[in-house]
Image (cartoon, grey):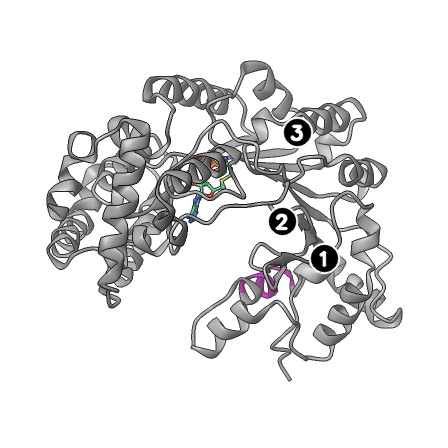
Amino acid sequence: MENKTICPNFFNNVMNDSFGVYKTCCLHVPLKDNKVVGVPVSEDLNVFWNSEYMKQSRLKALNGEEIKGCEECYRSEKNGGTSLRKDLVEIYEDDDEYNERLKLASENGGHLNKFPSALELRVGNLCNLKCRMCQPQDSDLINKEYKELISIDNSLSTILPVVDFEISDDLTNYIQSIKNNASEIKVIRFSGGEPLINKSFYELLDFLIENRFAEGIEFRLNTNLTKMKEDTLEKLSKFKKVTIDFSIDGLESVYEYIRYPMVWDVTKTKLNMTHSFMRKYENIKMNANFTVQIYNIFSMFDLVDFFLSRSMLPILHILQNPSYLNIRNMPDNLKQDVVAKIDETLATIDEKGYMDKFQVEWVSERLRAIKNQMSLDRNEFQIDLFKKFTNALDVKRNQNISIMIPEIAKYYE
Ligand SMILES: C[S@@+](CC[C@H](N)C(=O)[O-])C[C@H]1O[C@@H](n2cnc3c(N)ncnc32)[C@H](O)[C@@H]1O
Ligand code: SF4
């Protein structure tokens, strides 16, 4: 009988949450009664990997029982959808090494005497930007700005969640565990905050290269790209395979409005530099991460063209939270105009001469998903929150949506 609860992440994967605790999966939320729970990253990784929670979770998974913390995947499957769990099972079910891990855990009361093969490191909330859709646990600058705004207007506290505890970017013990077991690692992903301004990123990169582990490891990086340097790219090229997932939420003034206080020309220069490295090294690949939200819903079309014409995949993530930036909560006339533009794009995309047909098909599928998202019912209250949030940040940052993104501002007048 099909096991409907097992998830490969409990046997292969470890990451640290932005709040500073270990976990197996990005969807798991380590908060209970508004407090962070779990094993802190200041501990050795093995304290978490074979903790009572992990051993019991593995046994439950092997027996087809539900694991606490995985509700989001189970819910989505019960509603007839897919889930991260289901996708991972498809990837791993015929993998000999994964099946060996299941056997070992089952024979040892859930204890797994093998180091995780895939690791993600989130480098705390140190960041050089304060993107409008991002959150205090990913950017200390956002946390600071939200606190300042609330001190001026306390009514903003309902829409601006702040973090009142220290988020540690000290990954010393996590990194030491990785160094001690580097030969067992297949994939490492760095995310943040911003990895390129964190010393642990460079420390681990150098260690893996100097000790000849890099050539056996796939390295993935989520970055805003603004601090990328040539020598970092040279180092990255030593890894077996490299994927640079860089974030870009618009072009020119839309980019500058969302990814404050970055200047578009700086990012464009970094993008061109990284792209020319990619062309030089076959093992480096780049994807453009685009978080689809109300501010950039029209820029999406130019951005898709910008990247598809350079054979780079624009990954269109649909923002869910904060709700006031979610495209389901746009006014009807804005939704209608976006749907018309999507239909026109889908009807003409094959004639544009884009080289990579897989990329074209992938983007077309995402555009259809964006249409679905907009067809969901709107919460009327969110329109007022959108205006309140936009205005508060505009005043604080000396920006003006009517000047920087007039094509959106006109629907909110
Ligand atoms: C938190 S950032 C960390 C890495 C790096 N600083 C960057 O910007 O790529 C990781 C990704 O989350 C995206 N992101 C930010 N806020 C989001 C939100 N509210 N919903 C979904 N994705 C979001 C960012 O655009 C980025 O692609
Ligand atoms: S650069 Fe990344 S972490 Fe920093 S504010 Fe923007 S999305 Fe958040």
Kind of residue at disc 1: Gly
Mark 3: which amino acid? Answer: Phe
> Dot 2, how many residues are within 10 Å of its Cα: few (below 14), some (14-19), or many (20+)?
many
Question: Is residue 207 shown to the viewer in this render?
Answer: yes
In the rendered structure, which disc, 3 or 1, sits on the residue that comes first in sequence?
1
Measured in 3D between alpha carbons, the distance from the residue under mark 3 to the one under mark 1, in whole angstroms, is 24 Å
Q: Nearer the viewer, mark 2 or mark 3?
A: 2
Q: Is residue 380 magenta?
A: no
Q: Which mark is residue 38?
A: 1
Question: In terms of depth relative to the viewer, which is nearer, 322 or 66?
Answer: 322
CB atoms of marks 2 and 3 within 8 Å: no
The magenta-colored residue range is 87-92
Judge: label 3 CB < 8 Å from ligand 1: no
Q: Indicate the position of residue 4 as horizontal and vertical percent values.
A: 60, 77
**Label 2 near label 1: C-beta < 8 Å?**
yes
Q: Counting other residues with Cα less than 10 Å from the Cα at mark 1, is it few (<14), some (14-19), or many (20 or more)?
A: some
- Label 2 within 8 A of ligand 1 by Cβ: no
- Residue at 58% from the left image edge and 25% from the top image edge: 197
In terms of depth relative to the viewer, which is nearer, 170 or 245?
Answer: 170
Residue 40 place in picture, x, y as percent:
74, 49
Q: Position of residue 246 (x, y in %)?
A: 46, 34
Q: Residue at x 69, y 37 (%)?
A: 217
Decide which of tag 1 and tag 2 comes sooner along the chain.
2
Question: What's the residue type where badge 2 is placed?
Answer: Asp
Residue at left offset 78%, top offset 39%: 178
For the residues labelled 2 and 3, the Cα–Cα distance comes to 16 Å
Tell whether position 91 is magenta: yes
Q: Foreground mark, 3 or 1?
A: 1
- The residue under label 3 is 201
